[in-house]
Amino acid sequence: MCFALLRPILVVLVAAFMMMAGMGTLATVLGIRLVATGSSTLVIGLVMGAYWAGLTIGSVYTGRLIKGVGHIRCFGAAVAAISAATLLHAMIPGAAAWGVLRLVEGVCMAGVFVCMESWLNQKAASDSRGQILAFYMIALYAGQASGQTLLLLEDGQGPTIFLALSVLLSLTMLPVTLTRQTPPTLPDIVSFGLSRLYQASPLGLAGVVAAGLVGGAVVNMAPVVLVQSGRSVGDTALFMSAVILGGVLLQWPLGRLSDLFDRRTVLVSLFIALAVMGMSMALTVEAGFGLMLTGGVLFGGIIFTLYPVSVAHTNDWLRPADIVPASGGLVLGYSIGAAAGPFAASLVIDSAGPGGLFLFSAGMGLLAALFGLWRMLMRPPQPGERQSPYQTLPQTTPVAAPLDPRAPLPPRPHR
């Protein structure tokens, strides 16, 4: 049964794994290199946030390209552009050029995600969406975590790591471009605006924005603060893997708690835990690495759980037919936060030192918790039987939303 389910989507899962292995490592390498070249923390924050700005732009416009040239051509073109941009990081050094390249990479990654996720939608039946989504999430997280081992190839100012990443990213095209399977049809998704989302669930929207601010800051700026505090490249790779591993291990059990209790209480508790862990991590930046590594697992579990719990809380206040349209606004809210997060965190790092990244996270957690407590006073909770079940979700594009088992299955296109 499992093999029969995996067979039609295996090419997409392999591509997702390889793509995240390359792109996750590239972000870490760029942070380390920018520190080594003496770029200011503020500049690094702007460069790293450019990727998420590009992903947001690409999510809006890439559908037109796919409808014009087809999924496989669009996927191949996007991957080729990302591979070329990776090489250009070695050929054109400098923060300004790298910021432009990160923007381009974000736009192209949106095209990659839309192609992969619409392919998964095409293969998903009503009774297999949850399993397909789970396999997709495993491929994304496993690729991002395992790709950090490629940092062992980091050679200071040399091009080796960029060459290796370009090769890996180029190979991502093979399983998709050589498949004999019929390309999918892009689903039509009309997204909610942010104002309509706020009317439906103020805390849900605030939660995804806060998750983006903290997630974007930590994933992009943690390598920077680790290098600034004297950690080696190997330690940096291990810490980043620990944060992602924590997100994989703890996301499901923490999220399941929100099925058993008032989801707002769980979400506020997560924000309070974020504030406490942020303060604790700020104190361990220059302490023993083992302690920081353990903290990284817990920290990652909290960070990666905030988005899906916020989405689940929002869905509690929506009609089932509105779950997919609402996903566009939720992804947009997360992406806006993730684009602003690295620069916002850099302002705190610039004044407080390497521990400023975690102080920023603690501050965001505290503000979000206070907002959540206020919302609990303003609106009664949803009855337990009306809460939708928790589901882990990727923070990629709205095209992944139909994979959510809570959403109505879209009609199949006529052929």
Image (cartoon, rainbow, N blue to C red):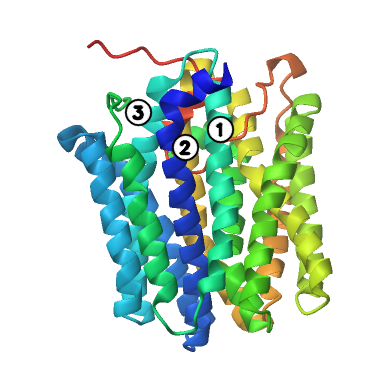
Look at 37% across and 69% down and name the residue there. Answer: 163
Which of the pair 408/148 is nearer the observer? 148
Q: Quadrant of the N terminus?
A: top right
**Mark 1 or 3 closer to N-term?**
1
Residue at x 47% of width, y 16% of height: 321
User: In the image, is 367 to the left or to the right of 44?
Assistant: right
Quadrant showing the C terminus: top left
Q: Residue 13: which disc? A: 2
Q: Mark 3 or mark 2, which is nearer to you?
A: 2
Q: On screen, 126 above or below 259?
A: above
Please tell me whether residue 286 is drawn above or below residue 4 in the rendered image. below
SS label for mark 2: helix
Image side of residue 370 versus residue 192, left or right? right
Q: Which residue is mark 3?
A: 190
Res. 269 in view: yes
Q: Could you tell me residue 43's position as x and y percent?
A: 45, 78
| Point 80% across, 73% down: residue | 284
Q: Nearer the viewer, residue 258 or 181?
A: 181
Residue picked out by circle 1: 135
Q: Which is more foreground, mark 1 or mark 3?
A: 1
Q: Amino acid at mark 2?
A: Leu
Q: Residue furthest bottom?
A: 38
Q: Residue at x 36, y 46 (%)?
A: 110
Is label 3 in contact with label 2 (beta carbons under 8 Å)? no
